[in-house]
Image (cartoon, rainbow, N blue to C red):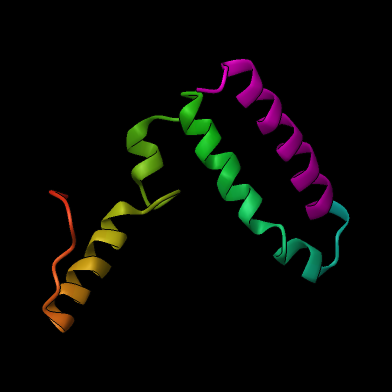
Amino acid sequence: MRTKNEIQQLKQELEILTGFITDYGIKEEIKNSNYACDIIDALWWVLEEITTEHFESDAYLDLFKLRAIAENIEHRTGKKKNGNLS
């Protein structure tokens, strides 16, 4: 497992890089780096800088929407998702 310090250092570097790209990059550069913002969000959760409830909300993961999409796929295809998910 990674140390808290290692995770914090990675988060800090990603925040600096994405901030710089957002402030000074062109549209394509910004678009190509958006995934890094999602990683920062996940690191915030791992480091307990945001609550699980907030991370699961529509501000981040939007688990309610993901569950609804999976349910629609189940109804459309007849396939069932694996696991015992809420």
Figure check: 2 above or below 30: above
Figure check: 56 above or below 12: below
Asked whether residue 7 is drawn in magenta, I would say yes
Residue 40 horizontal side relative to residue 86, left or right:
right
Q: Main secondary structure of the magenta part?
A: helix
Kindly identify the residue that appears in the image at 69 percent across and 31 percent down: 10
Give the quadrant of residue 24.
Answer: bottom right
Residue 81 horizontal side relative to residue 69, left or right:
left
Give the magenta part as a residue range.
1-22
Figure check: 56 above or below 73: above
Judged from this view, the residue extending furthest toward the right is: 24
> What is the total number of numbered labels drawn onto the structure image?
0
Residue 38 horizontal side relative to residue 15, left or right:
left
Judged from this view, the residue extending furthest toward the bottom is: 76
Kindly identify the residue that appears in the image at 44 percent across and 49 percent down: 59
Kindly identify the residue that appears in the image at 16 percent across and 51 percent down: 83
Give the quadrant of residue 79.
Answer: bottom left
Q: Choose between 70 and 3: the one closer to the eye.
A: 3
Spot occupied by residue 86 in the image (x, y as percentages of width and height) = 15, 49
Spot occupied by residue 11 in the image (x, y as percentages of width and height) = 66, 32
Q: Choose between 56 and 86: the one closer to the eye.
A: 86
Asked whether residue 15 is drawn in magenta, I would say yes
Kindly identify the residue that appears in the image at 27 percent across and 69 percent down: 69
Spot occupied by residue 50 in the image (x, y as percentages of width and height) = 46, 30
